[in-house]
């Protein structure tokens, strides 16, 4: 069945006349009439009754109309999808902090790949300031950074990651209802530090003590801190996402106490304003729906 004939049929109905449909389609009025007649022969029925200059759908025409409209809508969606895929780059350059690279992207990118199977990824790991600079310079398409604002960037909060004290299996703090910050401060500490204000708040939680916490290991690497705790070398404040698997398997245990309640690391997703909107929105939607981030 000829799509042009179906298009002429729908346009005649929409604009109420053969002449107007011909004008919109950049055709002559006899050409539109010929297309309608060809469609009527294909369907073996009469689609219009002509009453002088007026036209009116027949019962057959009324029944066929929703199918004709559906065919054109499906065709238009297909065209848009093809044009969109042509406009999207085959490579998506992603800049992210180390923690996002280790604990977030392995959960997001496979799901994203299912939506855009032809895409491949280039992941650049760096600090927040460097990633912002690279996004502004169009060296990176989408960045995952600590909370930041810039007038030329679109930025949305992707998730908040609570910072909690984590101890190893069998530690005496587990299940202790009388645990105090004083007792916590005397236990050997593995202190992970990334320079963010949230970590300064952790330090301040111990300022009222007569002695500083017993920091035995000081590191700027999350994996190092976590593995030292797993080896029972000490206890550590860790972002919850980095310890998700170990907590799920019973190897690490989060301990909550009031002095550090509500401290978390916020991760934002950024891109240049008005650019990469399709990918940006898809990643945001995936993060909201993925059980790992709930």
Image (cartoon, helix red, strand yellow):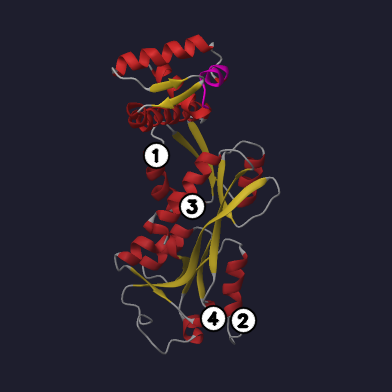
How far is disc 3 from disc 2 in space, using C-alphas?
A: 30 Å
How far is disc 1 from disc 3 in space, using C-alphas?
A: 21 Å
Number of residues whose C-alpha sits closer than 10 Å to that of mark 3, classed few (under 14), some (14–19) or many (20 or more): some
Using the image, determine if residue 60 lies above or below residue 255. Answer: above
Q: Position of residue 133 (x, y in %)?
A: 66, 44
Badge 2 element? loop
Which residue is label 1 attached to? 115
Which residue is label 4 attached to? 259
Using the image, determine if residue 227 lies above or below residue 263. Answer: above
Badge 4 element? helix
Residue situated in front as seen by the camera: 248 or 39: 39
> Nearer the N terminus, badge 3 or badge 2?
3
Which mark's residue is nearer the viewer, 3 or 2?
Answer: 3
Image quadrant assignment for residue 76: top left
Image quadrant assignment for residue 273: top right
As drawn, is 56 to the left or to the right of 149?
left
How far is disc 3 from disc 4 in space, using C-alphas?
A: 26 Å
Stretch in magenta: 16-23
Number of residues whose C-alpha sits closer than 10 Å to that of mark 2, classed few (under 14), some (14–19) or many (20 or more): few
How far is disc 2 from disc 1 in space, using C-alphas?
A: 49 Å
Which residue is located at x 62 percent, y 47 percent?
154
**Count the marks: how many?**
4
Which residue is label 3 attached to? 100
Q: Position of residue 122 (x, y in %)?
A: 49, 37
Number of residues whose C-alpha sits closer than 10 Å to that of mark 1, classed few (under 14), some (14–19) or many (20 or more): few
Which residue is label 2 attached to? 207
Badge 3 element? helix
> Nearer the N terminus, badge 1 or badge 3?
3
Which residue is located at x 65 percent, y 50 percent?
129
């Amino acid at each position: 069945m000829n799509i042009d004939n179906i298009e002429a049929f729908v346009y005649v109905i929409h604009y109420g006349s053969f002449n107007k449909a011909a004008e919109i389609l950049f055709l002559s009025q006899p050409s539109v009439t010929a297309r309608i007649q060809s469609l009527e022969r294909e369907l073996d029925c009469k689609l219009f009754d002509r009453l002088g200059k007026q036209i009116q759908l027949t019962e057959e025409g009324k029944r066929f109309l929703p199918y004709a409209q559906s065919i054109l809508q499906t065709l238009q969606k297909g065209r848009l999808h093809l044009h969109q895929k042509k406009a999207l780059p085959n490579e998506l350059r992603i800049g992210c902090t180390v923690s996002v690279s280790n604990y977030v992207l392995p959960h997001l990118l496979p799901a994203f790949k299912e939506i855009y199977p032809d895409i491949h990824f280039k992941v650049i790991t760096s600090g927040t300031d460097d990633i912002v600079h690279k996004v502004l310079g169009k060296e990176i398409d989408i960045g995952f950074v600590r909370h930041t604002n810039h007038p030329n960037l679109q930025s949305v909060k992707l998730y908040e990651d609570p910072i909690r004290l984590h101890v190893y299996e069998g530690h005496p703090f587990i299940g202790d209802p009388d645990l105090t910050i004083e007792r916590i401060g005397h236990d050997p500490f593995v202190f992970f530090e990334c320079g963010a204000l949230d970590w300064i708040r952790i330090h301040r939680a111990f300022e009222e003590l007569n002695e500083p916490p017993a920091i035995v290991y000081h590191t700027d690497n999350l994996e190092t801190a976590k593995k030292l705790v797993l080896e029972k070398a000490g206890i550590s404040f860790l972002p919850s996402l980095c310890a998700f698997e170990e907590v799920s398997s019973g190897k690490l245990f989060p301990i909550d106490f009031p002095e550090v309640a509500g401290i978390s690391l916020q991760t934002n997703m950024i891109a240049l304003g008005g650019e990469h909107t399709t990918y940006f929105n898809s990643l945001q939607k995936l993060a909201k729906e993925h059980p790992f981030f709930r």
